[in-house]
Image: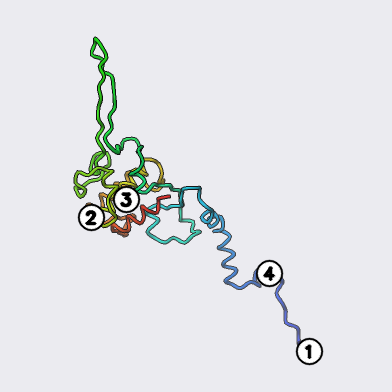
Amino acid sequence: MNTPDQPRPELPEANSEDSRPSSRRRFLKGGLAAAPVVASLASKPVLGSIQCTTASGAHSFVPVGSAHRTVHTCNGISASNWTSLSTWPAGYVRGSTTKSASADTGSFLKASSTTAQPTKFHSGTTGFGGTLMGAKTLLEVLQMGEAGTNGLAKHCAAALLNAAAGRTPVLSQTQVRNMWNDYNRLGYFEPTAGIRWNATQIVTYIKSTIG
């Protein structure tokens, strides 16, 4: 209690910014600027999709709300699901297919057919170099186990089909090929200069693009 002889301490104005602790002032100044970004990241993505980031951005744990973090929507399909789909993106053949055609011989039309062979993992179509998977088709690789290089090949095959189908805006077909080819040639993949991913890390990133 203040006695008449003691001056009453001056109180800061209720609305004065200086009345807030310095930590609170910093939070308010920085938090307001980041709020729209945080809100967009916290919002639920569309059904069957996930939020994903580029490989170059995924290597560093960029804080949520950072202006340098770019988020995309992905709905990639898993390797096991690709094995059960009868229709694959244009240019990739799941299994042997027969196409009928008519050949004009001049005097009559003669039916003919051509057979499209399954796409091989190592082929000009996929762009996957090396010989680690031998003569296996893309479908056969998709059916392999998760261990070691087999697992990497399996998920790269799925990533390639997802990219071709436009399901992963953060991964183009060229980027998927680079992941496999760099690993095949160097034993690692660099999402950005100075950062090296082993097979497990590459697979972990590819799985992050599956919805």
- For residue 136, which quarter of the picture? top left
User: What secondary structure is found at the residue carrying circle 1?
Assistant: loop
Render colour scheme? rainbow
Is residue 190 toward the left or the right of residue 134 in the image?
right
Q: CA distance from mark 1 to mark 3?
A: 79 Å
- Name the amino acid, label 4: Ser
Percent of width and height locating residue 35? 56, 58
Of callouts 4 and 2, the N-terminal one: 4
Most extreme residue toward the top is: 107
User: What secondary structure is found at the residue carrying circle 3?
Assistant: helix
Give residue 3's mark.
1
Nearest the viewer among 211 and 8 is: 211
Q: Residues within 10 Å of mark 1 (few under 14, many from 20)?
A: few
Of callouts 2 and 3, the N-terminal one: 3
Give residue 155's mark.
3
Tell us which disc is closer to us: 1 or 3.
Answer: 3
Residue at x 68%, y 69% (from the top left corner): 16
Of callouts 1 and 2, the N-terminal one: 1
Residue at x 32%, y 58% (from the top left corner): 201
Q: Which residue is mark 4?
A: 16
Q: Residues within 10 Å of mark 2 (few under 14, many from 20)?
A: few
Tell us which disc is closer to us: 4 or 2.
Answer: 2
Query: Does 88 sit above or below residue 63?
Result: above
Q: CA distance from mark 1 to mark 2?
A: 82 Å
